[in-house]
Image: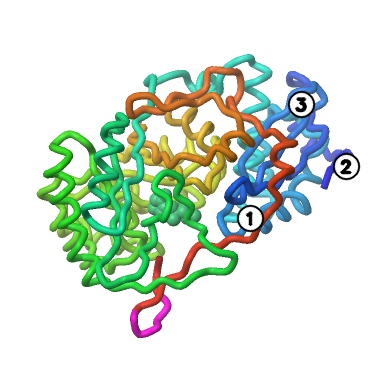
Amino acid sequence: MLHTVPAPQSPAQNASQGASQGARILSARVIVTCPGRNFVTLKIETDQGVYGVGDATLNGRELAVASYLEDHVIPCLIGRDAHAIEDIWQYLYRGAYWRRGPVTMTAIAAVDMALWDIKAKIAGLPLYQLLGGACREGMMVYGHANGVSIEETVEVAQSYKEKGYKAIRLQCGVPGLNSTYGVSKDKMFYEPADADLPTENLWDTEAYMRVVPKLFAAAREALGDEPHLLHDVHHRLSPIEAGRLGRDLEPYRPFWMEDAVVAENQDNFRLIRQHTTTPLAVGEIFSSLWDCKDLIQNQLVDYIRATVVHAGGVTHLKRIAAFADVYGVRTGCHGATDLSPITMSAALHVGRSIPNFGIQEYMRHTEATDEVFPHGYHFKDGLLYASETPGLGVDIDEEKAAKYPYQRAYLPVNRLKDGTLFNW
Ligand code: KDG
Ligand code: MG
């Protein structure tokens, strides 16, 4: 849907539309495309002929964000000063009455990214320059090594090491289970949403807890001391089980153990901390600073994984990172393939400009995705480098995007052997 009708003026709106550089929002559109997986993109056009793009992808709930933007956000944007990024952020967050939540915060993030793209294009600078400038050149990333067995996983990890990766996430199949989330069929282009309607996997905590330390032992032996090794638990352990797994992994010096437990009850992390020095990462499903606050200020985690698209955009992620820095917590932004290259591009500009960057997740997008979203960031020797072109340095090719219509796809669900629905 294309919105071009000017919104009614109010005194407050006039204030936010002040006499700045004269870039007003003329129109905005939502583009949904599925080059292998679904992506939702917001494109905002200004009366200066400059446009910006923002990622609005929320895996498995894509159309909810598209509707939120089209039906409830875009009509409020038309006619506003595209430079008033903070004011528009507050307008959409505080002004909506309903705050937070993944759908709202993803929609706000898309607007925020597109506006930063516009501002940086008008300034003629790559975005990181507007965010304070470079704190580093490249950002260390971690790749995904996964396989059905320990041997296969270690083999894939070896190939990542040969490609120059300095950090590798290890996930292997659990003996006795037919499939394990995080262990994909495709070794390079991992797609977590595997079916039209959710498939069902089985889960066995004891078997899982036996295999992971063996995987880390084998990987250390084969890869040596240097590569950072990471693991994602996908929220599947109880706090005391997580404490034990963390302790079992300590001899292999893991970089982090991610999403060890569900994070709704944040006291869970206190218990894990009492039992292990394995660093903890959490936050890929967090949507605001308020989800991160207690964990960060109580120093219960070491890495915060909130990312641009699901946590309110560049504006809000910078705020989360600044808060985390006070407590010695570093960033480790989510970067799975269900986040579009627009998010990756934005995350790299943020990562480049903050003092407490830790690591960036990097799953490669498919060729079709890269064609739909041409971008200037690139990988070299284990690091990703942000684009140097003005703006975010990423675009959407609408003609190519139109070739790939939306296809419903869901993440799998997970059950215990007795049929109980479990965390994934
Ligand atoms: O949409 C869900 C995926 O992005 C998620 O499962 C991937 O856990 C994940 C990760 O760490 O990348
Ligand atoms: Mg994860």
Q: What residue sits right under mark 2 in the picture?
A: 8
Kindly check if marks 3 and 2 are in contact, taking CB atoms under 8 A apart as contact.
no
Q: Which residues are magenta?
A: 417-421
Instruction: Sort mark 3 into few (<14), some (14-19) or many (20+) by Cα contacts within 10 Å.
Output: some
Query: In the image, residue 265 lies at what x, y percent?
Result: 37, 65
Instruction: Sort mark 1 into few (<14), some (14-19) or many (20+) by Cα contacts within 10 Å.
Output: many
Residue sitting at x 36%, y 35%: 141
Left or right for 339, reference 48:
left
Q: CA distance from mark 2 to mark 1?
A: 29 Å
Furthest-top residue in this view: 124
Say which mark, if any, is on residue 319: none
Amino acid type at circle 3 is Gly
Kindly check if marks 2 and 1 are in contact, taking CB atoms under 8 A apart as contact.
no
Query: In the image, residue 65 lies at what x, y percent?
Result: 66, 54
Q: CA distance from mark 3 to mark 1?
A: 34 Å
Amino acid type at circle 1 is Glu
Q: Is residue 179 above or below residue 377?
A: below
Say which mark, if any, is on residue 62: 1
